[in-house]
């Protein structure tokens, strides 16, 4: 604050020293404003004099006051209201590789709409419904083109809410190099500590750069103004923030990295480390799932680039631009839209067992994933083997249901992994199965969200065994499904979710015997303990829902946007006053 009296007295003195002091004070102001952006919202005391006082005080405290007034839980309505009040109706553009609905042509010729198995889509779709913005994504469905207009646009409507989906078309080589190659054979294994080595091919990197530019162009075409608010999602678009910043210096760019950010030694093996970091630093804010990933990112930046890192402020200053780095743990909509349309847990329980030809008293352990080596399915199957080996005769039947949606199957590592999982399931069923009883049921196909919700309601246990996972929303969806306050969540400690969901039974998925012991504890847990744990988990997810995730990010962006606009005005005014004073 000390800078401000100096600033005004320097201006008023009209001396030649005024220019130097005032310039230094403006940079002090800049630093102060950006540091204010990092704190908890509250009305900000302003000590300097008119004419700026009223303006700054008004703008900054308006945000804080409205925010304070908006009490109560975060909901779609509150998010909508927040956008209306703070962003004055400015359009929000989401950029994500995966589209929220995919038009597929079946062999019969019929076109169906699929909702992909993607945590990102699960989280962002309700946010888009609340914001009515534009979602820019790769049009990957076999019937996507014929279902869109000439510009690749299609309206996605839900009741009275709707938003626009803008599809970007990629050719075979682009998709192979950018999505399968650089995103999923280089960055995905680079960021996940699981069983795969990253593969860096220069040709993939070139396609990644090219395709990032194509998506950046599509975002700009949709923006229709020079200061859009863009939510860039995930590791597919690390270069887009900088591309957008160059074309729209005033844009508010919020980038969210859904997957882990590894430690600096690991990240530094990427031959394109500098370009990726520079690309991301085009963002106004970069969000990660956990504080640890923020820390890892700051370390990577510090090691690779000439920048100033604010370790207290959690920011990076590069070429006079500040990028805030923040943890925003992602979540799901609450309440789930399926909670009223899917039958109650008792009905689901009976129906699912009947569908699977299992006796009504069968204990059911459910896991739902994409078929991906990071999800710990091999370890899970070995744990199931240990559990079945020790399962007492008199304890009644037990069955493990694994939904594994096919994923990235053009990549050899994924094909090999799928084969391994299928053969292990066969082996276990041969070893432990009997006439009419298969202890492990594998559904290696796409499941629509209501089917998954029904399974969650039918389960005694949901087991999430990821070896490394940014968040894992399956864990939160299981909790959302259990309004009967029953069921036990067994959760890998290597998920971001384990930080928040502390009443789950948290396990190390590599410790096969340890997890088998925990599964036995879960299978015999009393209804009272299940209720206590589930009640607490439900209140956690209800409060920290996806509207809060989006609301917090957008409010941080709003404050940043106000301050940046104000800085531009202040700088202009300062220049004019200096010009008058000096000459
Ligand atoms: O977890 C990272 C992620 O991109 C998610 O955001 C999404 O749930 C998942 O991978 C889906 O992968 P894909 O889009 O390659 O099918």
Image: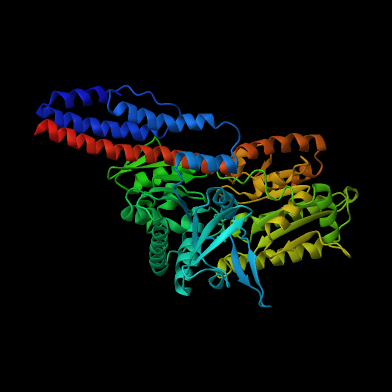
Residue 41 makes an appearance in the image: no
Q: Which residue sits at x=39%, y=35%?
A: 311
84 or 383: nearer the viewer: 84
Which quadrant: the C terminus? top left
Q: Which residue sits at x=57%, y=43%?
A: 547
Residue farthest bottom in this picture: 108
For residue 242, side relative to residue 397 (left or right): left
428 or 300: nearer the viewer: 300
Above or below residue 177? Residue 254 is above
Above or below residue 155? Residue 524 is above
Q: Which of the 4 image quadrants contains residue 352?
A: bottom right
Q: Quadrant for ligand 1?
A: bottom right
Tally the numbered discs.
0
Which quadrant: the N terminus? top left
Q: Which of the 4 image quadrants contains residue 372?
A: bottom right
Above or below residue 110? Residue 131 is above
Residue 540 makes an appearance in the image: yes
Above or below residue 321? Residue 1 is above
Residue farthest front in this picture: 160
Residue 91's spot in the image, x, y percent?
45, 50
For residue 410, side relative to residue 206 (left or right): right
Residue 338's spot in the image, x, y percent?
71, 50
77 or 404: nearer the viewer: 77
Residue farthest right in this picture: 394
């Amino acid at each position: 604050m000390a800078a401000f009296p100096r600033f005004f007295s320097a201006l008023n003195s009209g001396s030649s020293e005024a220019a130097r002091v005032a310039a230094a004070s403006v940079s002090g102001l800049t630093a102060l404003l950006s540091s204010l952006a990092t704190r908890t919202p509250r009305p900000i005391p302003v000590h300097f004099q008119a004419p700026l006082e009223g303006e700054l005080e008004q703008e900054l405290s308006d945000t804080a006051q409205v925010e304070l007034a908006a009490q109560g839980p975060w909901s779609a309505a509150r998010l909508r209201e927040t956008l209306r009040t703070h962003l004055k109706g400015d359009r929000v553009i989401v950029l994500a590789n995966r589209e929220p609905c995919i038009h597929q042509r079946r062999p019969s010729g019929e076109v169906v709409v699929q909702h992909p198995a993607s945590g990102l889509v699960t989280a962002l779709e309700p946010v888009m419904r609340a914001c009515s913005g534009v979602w820019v994504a790769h049009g990957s469905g076999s019937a996507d083109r014929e279902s869109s207009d000439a510009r690749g646009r299609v309206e996605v409507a839900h009741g009275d809410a709707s938003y626009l989906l803008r599809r970007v078309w990629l050719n075979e080589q682009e998709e192979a190099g950018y999505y399968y190659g650089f995103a999923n054979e280089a960055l995905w294994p680079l960021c996940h500590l699981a069983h795969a080595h990253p593969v860096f091919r220069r040709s993939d990197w070139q396609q990644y750069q090219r395709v990032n530019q194509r998506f950046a162009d599509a975002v700009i075409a949709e923006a229709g103004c020079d200061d859009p608010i863009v939510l860039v999602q995930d590791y597919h678009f690390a270069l887009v923030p900088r591309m957008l910043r160059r074309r729209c210096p005033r844009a508010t760019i919020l980038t969210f990295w859904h997957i882990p950010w590894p430690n600096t030694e690991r990240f530094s093996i990427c031959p394109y480390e500098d370009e990726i970091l520079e690309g991301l630093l085009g963002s106004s804010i970069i969000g990660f799932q956990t504080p640890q990933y923020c820390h890892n990112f700051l370390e990577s930046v510090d090691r690779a680039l000439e920048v100033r890192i604010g370790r207290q402020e959690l920011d990076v200053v590069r070429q006079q631009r500040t990028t805030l780095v923040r943890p925003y743990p992602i979540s799901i909509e609450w309440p789930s839209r399926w909670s009223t349309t899917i039958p109650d847990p008792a009905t689901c329980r009976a129906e699912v067992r009947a569908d699977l030809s299992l006796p009504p008293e069968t204990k059911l352990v459910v896991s739902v994933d994409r078929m991906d080596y990071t999800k710990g399915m091999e370890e899970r199957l070995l744990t199931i083997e240990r559990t079945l080996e020790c399962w007492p005769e008199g304890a009644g039947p037990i069955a493990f249901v694994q939904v594994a949606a096919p994923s990235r199957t053009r990549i050899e590592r994924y094909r090999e992994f799928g084969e391994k999982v299928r053969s292990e399931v066969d082996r276990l069923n041969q070893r432990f199965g009997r006439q009419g009883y298969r202890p492990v049921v594998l559904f290696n196909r796409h499941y629509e969200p209501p089917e998954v919700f029904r399974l969650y309601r039918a389960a005694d246990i949901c087991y999430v065994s990821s070896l490394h996972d940014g968040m894992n929303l399956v864990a939160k969806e299981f909790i959302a499904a259990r309004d009967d306050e029953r069921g036990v969540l067994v959760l890998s400690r290597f998920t971001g979710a384990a930080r928040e969901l502390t009443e789950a039974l948290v396990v190390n998925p590599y410790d096969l015997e340890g997890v088998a012991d925990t599964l036995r504890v879960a299978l015999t847990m009393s209804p009272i303990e299940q209720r206590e744990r589930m009640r607490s988990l439900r209140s956690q997810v209800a409060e920290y829902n996806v509207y809060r995730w989006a609301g917090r990010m957008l409010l941080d962006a709003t404050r940043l946007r106000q301050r940046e606009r104000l800085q531009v005005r202040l700088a202009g005014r300062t220049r004019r006053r200096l010009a008058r004073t000096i000459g």
